[in-house]
Image (cartoon, rainbow, N blue to C red):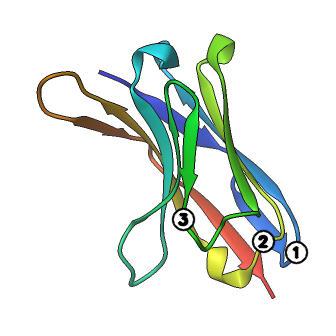
Amino acid sequence: QVQLVESGGGLVQAGGSLRLSCAASRGILSINAMAWYRQAPGKQRELVAVYITGGSTNYADSVKGRFTISRDNAKNTVYLQMNSLKPEDTAVYYCNAKVYGLGPIYDYWGQGTQVTVSS
């Protein structure tokens, strides 16, 4: 089991920055991948960024060059630095942890944090 708690959302003007944090209840080195997803009203949840234990990262095309995912293993925390924010980035952002071995993938989710970008 993994509990995830997000923080850092809020209201920001277009062009501004926010940093989201996700604190995990257990050591993130034991978690295969940590990711950020977002869901805008009336849209499906989409992957924003993922950090795979071992160091590789991947980003949605819409955020490449603007968002950066990072992690602090000592604090069991993953971050999403969001720069040059656009109104279309407005969504609820969810932290996700994926735990898998030889069996099924287990997904754990945080409660979500609202990000609103005004034009």
Considering the image in quadrants, where does the C terminus appear?
A: bottom right
Apparent side of residue 65 relative to residue 26 in the rendered image (left or right):
right
User: Callout 3: few (<14), some (14-19), or many (20+) C-alpha neighbours within 10 Å?
Assistant: few
Residue at image mark 2: 85
Residue at image mark 3: 60
Three-letter code, disc 2 = Leu
- Report if the CB atoms under discs 2 and 1 are less than 8 Å apart: yes
What's the CA distance linking mark 2 and mark 1?
A: 5 Å
- At a point 61% along the width and 74% down the height, the residue shown is 62
Three-letter code, disc 3 = Ala
Apparent side of residue 110 relative to residue 115 in the rendered image (left or right):
left
- At a point 75% along the width and 63% down the height, the residue shown is 65
- Report if the CB atoms under discs 2 and 3 are less than 8 Å apart: no
Residue 44, quarter of picture: bottom left
Instruction: Report if residue 97 is visible in the image.
Output: yes
Q: How many marks?
A: 3
Considering the image in quadrants, where does the N terminus appear?
A: top left
Residue at image mark 1: 15
Q: Residue 83 at x, y = what percent?
A: 82, 62
Three-letter code, disc 1 = Gly
- At a point 59% along the width and 19% down the height, the residue shown is 76
Q: Nearer the viewer, residue 104 or 44?
A: 104
78 up-or-down from 19: above or below: above
Q: Is tag 2's residue or tag 3's residue first in the polypeptide sequence?
A: 3
